[in-house]
Amino acid sequence: QVQLKESGGELVQAGDSLRLSCAASGGTLSSYGMGWFRQAPGKEREFVCYIMWTTGNTYYADSVKGRFTISRDNAKNTVYLQMNSLKPEDTAVYYCARRRFYTAGYYNASEYVDWGQGTQVTVSS
């Protein structure tokens, strides 16, 4: 079974940039799309972005469009989330996951499996 591990989260100031990584072990990501979700204190887990592994097509939540970029490296079996112009509202635990189902939409967390443990991103004002 594929295991995912997020890394790169830390405390930064508003306006800073940060790159998160999601590394896979126990298998490859070549046949699946990958998504990033985040969960802030007291809020539900929300969709951030998604990438189709084979085509490279990407999709973003309106709240991060133009600031965040998702990408993948097939050779390293890793997906990245480049975050620029960070805002305090971006503070959350960020999770990556592999898309398994294709019925409710790529923005729906129920479509995904193999969730990582998450990495904390804190943006101070």
Image (spheres, rainbow, N blue to C red):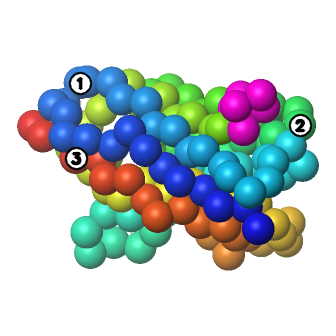
First in residue order: circle 1 vs circle 2: 1
Q: CA distance from mark 2 to mark 3?
A: 32 Å
Q: Secondary structure at mark 3?
A: strand
Q: Which residue is mark 1?
A: 15
Find residue 94 and report its image quarter.
bottom left
Q: Residues within 10 Å of mark 2 (few under 14, many from 20)?
A: few
The amino acid type of the residue labelled 1 equals: Gly
**Number of disc labels:** 3
Q: Quadrant of the N terminus?
A: bottom right
Magenta-colored span: 72-77
Q: Residue furthest left?
A: 125
Residue 43 position within the rendered picture, expressed as x and y whole percent measured from the top left:
33, 72
Q: Residue furthest front?
A: 26
Q: Which residue is mark 3?
A: 122
As displayed, is residue 115 above or below residue 27?
A: below
Q: Is residue 6 visible in the rendered structure shown here?
A: yes
Q: Residues within 10 Å of mark 1 (few under 14, many from 20)?
A: some
> Label 3 near label 2: C-beta < 8 Å?
no
First in residue order: circle 1 vs circle 3: 1
Q: Quadrant of the C terminus?
A: top left
Q: For residue 54, which numbered disc appears in the image? A: 2
Residue in the picture at 49% in, 57% down? 95
Q: Nearer the viewer, mark 1 or mark 3?
A: 3
Q: Nearer the viewer, residue 110 or 96?
A: 96
Q: Residues within 10 Å of mark 3 (few under 14, many from 20)?
A: many
The amino acid type of the residue labelled 3 equals: Thr
Find residue 70 and report its image quarter.
top right
The amino acid type of the residue labelled 2 equals: Thr
Residue 74 on the magenta segment: yes
